[in-house]
Image (cartoon, grey):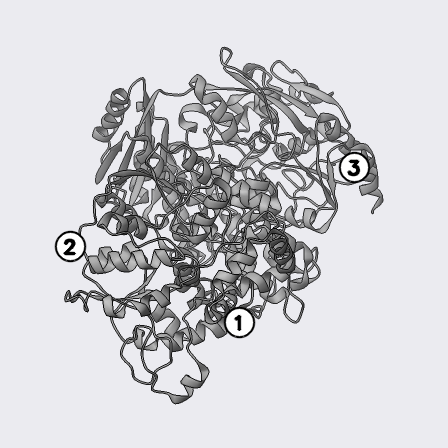
Amino acid sequence: MTDLEARLRAVVRGEVGFDVTSRALTTMDASNYRRVPAGVVAPRDADDVAAVLAVCREEGVPVVARGGGTSIAGQATGTGVVLDFTRHMNRLVALDPEARTAVVQPGLVLDRLQEAAAPHGLRFGPDPSTHSRCTLGGMIGNNSCGSHSVAWGTTADSVRDLDVVTARGGRLRLGRDWAGAPDGLRELTEGELARLRTGFPELPRRISGYALDALLPENGADVARSFCGSEGTLGVLTEAVVRLVESPRARALAVLAYADESAAAEAAAGLLPFGPLTVEGMAADLVPSTAELPRGGAWLFVETGGESAGEARARAEAIVRAADVVDALVVTDPAGQRALWRIREDASGTATRMPDGTEAWPGWEDCAVPPARLGAYLRDFRALMAAHGLRGTPYGHFGDGCIHVRIDFDLLTAAGVARFRRFSEELAELVVAHGGSLSGEHGDGQARAELLPRMYGAEMVGLFERVKGVWDPDDVLNPGMLVRPAPLDSGLRFSVLPREPVDVAFGYPSDGGDFSAAVRRCVGVAKCRTTSVSGSGVMCPSFRATGAEEHSTRGRARLLHEMLAGEVVADGWRSEEVRDALDLCLSCKGCRSDCPVGVDMATYKAEFLHQHYAGRRRPAAHHALGRLPVWLRAVSRTHTARLVNVLSAVRPLARAAKRLGGLAPEREIPRLATRTFSRWWEGRGASGPSAQGSPVRGDLVVLWPDTFTEHLSPGVGRAAVRVLEAAGLRVALPPTLRLAKPPVGDGRTVALDPLSLLRGRGRVCCGLTYVSTGQLDRARTVMRRTLDLMEPVLETGAPVVVLEPSCAAALRTDVPELLHDDPRAARLAAKVLTFAETLERHAPGWAPPRVDRPVAGQTHCHQHAVLGDAADHRLREAALLTGELSGGCCGLAGNFGFEKGHYEVSAACAQEQLLPSVRDAPEGTVVLADGYSCRTQLQQLAGVRGRHLAEVLAEALGASPGHDGT
C-alpha cells in the first residue's frame, strides 16, 4: 500500500481503490486520450471530498472529478486521484414543484432527475444524447446542452446555486451578486471589465474557456454561472440547486427532408422564429436505414410543443409549410417519436465508423458558429477536410450552429498524428473566422485548450490563468485542462496498443481480423451504463444488476484495452482482473446490436477464456456445461435418462453433483427427456404425412435438432414439425453420417463411406456451449464435423430451420467468425432461418391458426441481437397473439445462470423485465419463451411454463404434440 493510499483510507469513509481494476477502468473517458490515475475514490459526502483534497494537496497529487465518464475532450481523465461520484453522491436530494427547482448531487444521472420531475409536468432543460448515463455534475462541469437548447439553453441557464469545495478546503455556496466568490476573484474581474465586455463572441453555444463574462455586473455577477463549464479546474461540486422548466403537455416531431446537409443547414436558422423546441440535423451517412424517414439526403428534426396534440401538430405543420423541403413527415405518436429520436441519438456512436467501416474519432466534435453562418461554415469545413484527405459526417444542433463530427484521423502512426495536429490548427482558425467557438457543448479539455489563444488571444487566456490561480493556487484540480494545457496530440490512447495484430482464434471480420481494432470499437459513449432499458433493448444486464463499471460493456472493453497495453494490467491473457470482470458477462450479445459502435463482448469473452485457460486447468463448470452435448448424447446412447432424472431428484446426490460440476447450489437440475426428438422422428416413419396418403409437396426444409430441443425440450421439435407440415413444407433432419455424393439426409440415410459405420453416427452441433465457455479449439472441431455432415444440405436450396435462438445466432455468427478460413461456414450461416422466418418465406400463403389470446414473455436476447424478431412479430399478429414481449435478458443465458456464484445476478436480471411481465399479465395470457434458458428461468424462479411459439401454434391446430419427455 502506498503512503497516499494509506492516508486516504484513514480519512475517507467511501471506497478507496488503488487496485489494478479501479485504475484501469478510469484511464479513459470518451475521448482520444488516456491517463493512468494513481487511484480512485468514491466519496460519500462533501466531507470525504474535502478530506481527499487536503491529502492530495499536501502530497502534491492532482484531483480529477468524474461523473459518467462520457466527456470527449479528455477532461475526465487524470494522473492523480479520480473522484467517482456515481457510486454514492448520486441522489436527488429534493424537488420543489412550486419553485420549479431541484437539489441534486453531482453523480445523479440526468434521466433520474427527469423521471422525478415528469409527474409534476417539469423537466431539466438540457438533455444531451447521453441523458441515460451522463451526470448532473459532469453536465455542470462541461456546461452541457443537448437537443432542446434552442428552447431552454445550456446547463448554465438552468443553474441557480452550487455548493463547491475548493482545492484548499473552502466550502463555498456560489450564486448571483458575487455569492461564494473566492477571495480575490471580484477584484481581479473588476479590473478587467472592458476586456470581459468585448472579448467573448456572441453566439448561443459558446462553451470554450471560462465564462468570465457571467461575472459582469450587468449579468448579475453570477459566480455559479461562471463556474459552469470550468471542467473541474476551479473547485469540486458537491451539490447543486437547478432550475426546472415546464414540459409541454403534448409534442409533435416534424422531420424535414432536404437534398443534402448544406441545404438543411441553410434552412435551420430560418425556423427559429417559430419557437421550436429542437432543430437537429443529420445526413444519410449516419442512418443505417432511411426507411422510417421521408425521402431525402439530410434531415432536420424539429420538435414543437403545445397544450394538446392538436396544437403541437398545428405548430409542426406550420413549420413544414414554411420550410422549403424535399419531403416531410409529422409524427405525434410518442412511440413513433421515440423511434425517430433514437436514430438521432445513436449518431454519437454510429459516427465513430465511416460507411466503409473505417474508424473515426472525436477531437473536433462540437464546434459552434452563429446559426446564420452554419451553411457557409459547413462548406468551408468540408473543403478543409478534403484538403487534408479526411472524411467525416457532420450532424448535431443545427438550430444553435453546433456541429458534431467524428473524423477518420489516423491516430496510430506518427504521420497520421502530425496530420491530426495540422488539421486541428487550421480548423481552429476557420471556426474563429466564422465567429465561432472551438467548443459548443463538450468543453475544451485537452483536445482544444491548446488552441484557445487563437479564439481569445493571449491576453484573455492569460486572464484565464490568473482566474485559475485565484480558485486553485496550487494547481491541484485537473491540471493540464483549459490553462497551461497539455499538447493536443500527446497522451493518445491508441499509442499504447500493439502495432501488430494479436494472434487470436476468431476472425473479427468487421475489424480486419485485428483484436486490437475490435477492442478500439469502444469509444466510451457508455450506452451500456443505462440503468433501465426501453422497448426490446438488452444491453447491459450485468451492469444493471450490479451497478459496477467493471460489469458494463465499456468497463470490460477498458480492461481489455489495458490488457493489450500491458502497463496497468500487466499479466496479458492471464490477467485475473480481466477474467473477474468478464465472469459476470452473460454473453447475451445485447451489445452486438444495442451498442452504437457494435462492441461484441460475448465474442471477446469467449476469446479471452480461450487464451486465459490455454494449457491450464479450467473451472469445473466449463466441463460440466461446456461439454453438455457430450454428456447428453452419452445418456441418450445408454438409455439412462430416466435413471438420471431419478438420481437428480435425490437432494444429497443433486447437491454432490452440483458441487462437483461447479454449478449453483440454488439451481435445480433440469429433467432430461426420456425420448429424444430424433428417436421420435425415427419412430414416426410409418405414420408421417406421406405414409398417411397425404404427401407434402411444398418446399423442403431441414430442421436443426439442437441439443436443447433434442434432449431437453423435444416437444418443441415435435410441435415445429407439425406446424411446418401443416403449412405444406417437407421436413427433413440433417444427415448423421458423412456421405460421399448423397441426397439430403433425414437422419436415417445409409452411409456410402464404410469407415463412417465404424465411427458411428454423428450429430450436428453449432458449438454454442463450447464457445460460451471459451473452449474454442473444441468448438472448431465440432463445427468442422458439423460442416462435413451438412455438405449435402449446402448443395440444395433448402433452408436450415433452427428453433433455439441461441443456436441460430451461433450458426449465423460464431461459426463463420470462428471458421473464417472455411467457406462452408458462411454458406451454412446464410441458410439459417428462424421458425417464423421459414414460414414467412417458404409458406407465404399459409395462414396460422387463430389463437386470439394476449401474450407475455421476453424476446430472446440472441434473437434481438443477431436474428431480429420482425418475422416473429408478424406471425404472432397473424395468429391473433396480441401484445408485446419485453426486452432485457432472462438472466439464465445458457451456462451463465447455472454456474456457481452467478445465481443472484441471474435472478436480478430476470426480475428486471421478464418476471414482472409474466406476473402482471392477465389471466389467459400465453407466456412465450422461444429459448430453453428463458423457459427454464421462468419455471425455476416463477413456477411458470413458458412455451415456444411453435408449441402454441401446434396446439391451436388441434391435436397437441404432447409434453416434453413423453
629 to the left or right of 78: left
Q: Is residue 405 above or below residue 94?
A: below
Q: Is residue 305 above or below residue 570?
A: above
Q: Which mark is residue 845?
A: 2
913 to the left or right of 415: left
Q: Amino acid at mark 3?
A: Cys
Q: CA distance from mark 1 to mark 2?
A: 42 Å
Q: Earlier in the sequence, mark 1 or mark 2?
A: 1
The quarter in which the C terminus is drawn is bottom left
For residue 419, say whether it is visible: no
954 to the left or right of 176: left
Q: Position of residue 732 (x, y in %)?
A: 28, 69
Q: Is residue 174 above or below residue 735?
A: above
Q: Which mark is residue 778?
A: 1
Q: Nearer the viewer, mark 3 or mark 2?
A: 2
Q: Earlier in the sequence, mark 1 or mark 3?
A: 3
Q: Position of residue 51 (x, y in %)?
A: 78, 30
- The residue positioned farthest toward the bottom in the image shown: 754
Q: Amino acid at mark 1?
A: Arg
Residue in front for this viewpoint, 413 or 20 = 20
Is disc 3 in contact with disc 2, using a CB cutoff of under 8 Å? Answer: no
Q: Quadrant of residue 836?
A: bottom left
Categorize mark 3 by other alpha carbons within 10 Å: few (<14), some (14-19), many (20+): many
For residue 202, say whether it is visible: yes
Question: Residue at image x 39%, y 62%?
Answer: 812
Q: Position of residue 939 (x, y in %)?
A: 46, 45
Q: Nearer the viewer, mark 1 or mark 3?
A: 1
Q: Position of residue 520 (x, y in %)?
A: 54, 56
Categorize mark 1 by other alpha carbons within 10 Å: few (<14), some (14-19), many (20+): some
Q: Earlier in the sequence, mark 3 or mark 2?
A: 3
Residue under pointer 3: 56
Q: Secondary structure at mark 1?
A: helix
